[in-house]
Image (cartoon, rainbow, N blue to C red):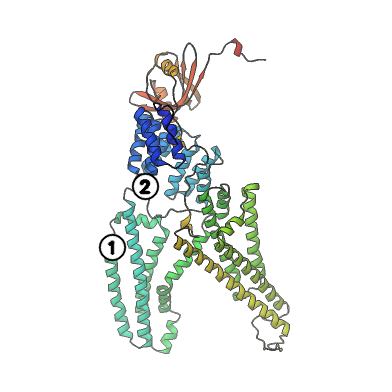
Amino acid sequence: MPPPHDRADPRAWCAVAVARLSRDQPEAALEAARQAVGRDPDGEWGHRLASLALERLGRDSEAVASAREAVRLAPGSWAARLRLGGALRRVPGRWRDAWAEARKAVRFAPDEPDAHVLAGDLALLRGEQDRAARSYELALRRTPDHPGARINLGLTLLRWERPRAHHDPAWDVDPRETGRARHAVEVWSRQVRVLLAAALTAVSVAGLGLGLHREAQLGGAVVLGAVLAITIRQAGRVRAWPYVPAMLGRDLWLSMSVSVTLMAIAAYVAGLATLPPVTPASLEEAAGGVWAGALGLVLFNGVAVAVVRLLAEAWRGRPLRALGHFAAVPADRTALRDIDVTLWIVAGRVWWLTVLAALLPLTGEPRTALAALAVLGGLLYARRRLARRTGGRRALRLGPFLRADRWLAVAFLALLVAIACLTVAGMAGAGMAGAGVSPTAGTTAAGAVQDGGRTAGEAAWDVVERSSLLGSWGSLALVGLAFGARAARAWWRGGAGPWRASLVLSEARGPRLPGDMSPSTGLSDEVRHAATYSRSVVLAYTEPDGPRALAVSAVTSVSASGEFRLIAGDEAWDAVERDPRVVLFVGDPRFWAEVRGVAVPDNDVLRITPRRVLMREYPGRHQARSR
């Protein structure tokens, strides 16, 4: 993007900076923004663009400084507030300041979608999905095709959590400190559980297999000293102890890890105390007593936690509605990535339902075919609902995603095979039940009649049922292998994996100009002159019982950036506190001007930053309404 023809015009340099930012050229955009600032230091637009360019270059502290300068020059500019909030968002410990600026941007310009999107992003980063969803919905009411609001609203439906869920961005502590504290707690939990599992296994072998009952208990007690040493060592690495209880409240999996570790320690102590002596009667009694339960908890707590986490990952949120929002932005790369991850979540749900259907024959339930068909019907209903929700040409087409992610295609194909096998197994079981033969009855190799008159045909039904069940379990295992292969490919290539952690926020604004790039409103020399010298100045604002107009005592000045400073009565000040949006009418012998803007109290004057300026001639007889 070449320099402007008029190199003395600061707004022309700002336009060049906007074009360069749109082409992802932050260094060149920073140069153009600085040229604009050098020619017009009082113009907030140039400072805003410099802040945005610095942010894209990773110079966050400088970006905040430039954004603050823009706010100082135009405190009523919603775009300047938006830029400052976006810059503060990236600085650790400044979430509350960023939130305050985002709320001001929303208050100054509730009709602008980007202000609501920033408020939603900040709420989502803190884990407040409901508040974020309300902000995104407000943005979509104003701009239905806003891609960032649409994608991030889908994330709220999935109950998305940012990678550092344990850290509250509103805390003043450095997130690296809380990250180190979380890592220390995780290491403590993992080391203690592995140590206790190995120790209780060795104690059981020594006490029950070798007959060293007392020696095994003493040796197991010594292991508790090692647990204490691990605890002291990891506790010394935590520097953010005041925040640890809040971290446990924010991070479900961290609190579950700590809880399971404490339960494992208690179970280990109980297992040591109830270790049975080597006698047949005591062993038979211990097999169903406290010792057996303690052994199972210490050895298999990791498996239980993994199963609970898989269930939670698959069943948290509303993926079908989220897919409807993602599919409404078909050309966005972030939306495509989130669609792929969400389809894996849907596949996980179908896998769990199919597993439950496959477990029915083991419980003696004869309606396996109905359960399998119900799973298939649910899958088809979900597909139809997606097509109806996104509507017409924006219906979600699975073909491109299955071709791009072959392992996802393998997973869905294996699920369909598993459902088909379960349906056949259920029909075979129903056929055997209709013949009055128990499915567990045995047959000879030749199909001779045994166990109450079982025929060769009935034996064939049994073979079909068993083969179909085996095929369904094999297909379900293939789904797990496909997930593992997809995860391994993502790890090897450093790309997005098939899990929730790969879901990302969108900062896309579509073809429209982002709010923090939008130009400031300029004033013509005529409006400046009229506002400075005219005595016909009227301020209109909103009262609880309706709009009101008030004559202004005086316009003290009009700044170089186009900001009005005026003196008004207490009524106007009270109204501005309620709603800062005002309209200033300026009269001149030749024309009248309507200035719509935002008023901000500053000492003894009201500073009005214009958002829109309209100039009109006075109405005459030729402008009378025709009848």
Task: Locate the C terminus and report the quarter of the image it occupies.
Answer: top right
Of the residues under marks 2 and 1, which one precedes in the sequence?
2
Residue under numbered circle 2: 170
The image shows residue 442 at horizontal and vertical percentages of: 65, 86
Which label is found at residue 414? Answer: none
Task: Locate the N terminus and report the quarter of the image it occupies.
Answer: top left
The image shows residue 132 at horizontal and vertical percentages of: 47, 46
136 shown above or below 314: above
Residue under numbered circle 1: 235
The image shows residue 239 at horizontal and vertical percentages of: 28, 56
Q: Residue at x 35, y 43 (%)?
A: 60
Q: Give the quadrant of residue 47.
A: top left
Quick check: 607 left or right of 513?
left
Q: Residue at x 44, y 59 (%)?
A: 494
Looking at the image, which is closer to me, 439 or 328?
Answer: 328
Query: Three-letter amino acid code at disc 2?
Result: Ala
Q: Residues within 10 Å of mark 1 (few under 14, many from 20)?
A: some
* Secondary structure found at label 1: helix
Looking at the image, which is closer to me, 486 or 319?
Answer: 486
Quick check: 482 left or right of 258?
right
Q: Could one spot residue 620 in this view of the protein? A: yes
209 shown above or below 372: below
Distance from label 2 to label 1 (Cα)? 24 Å
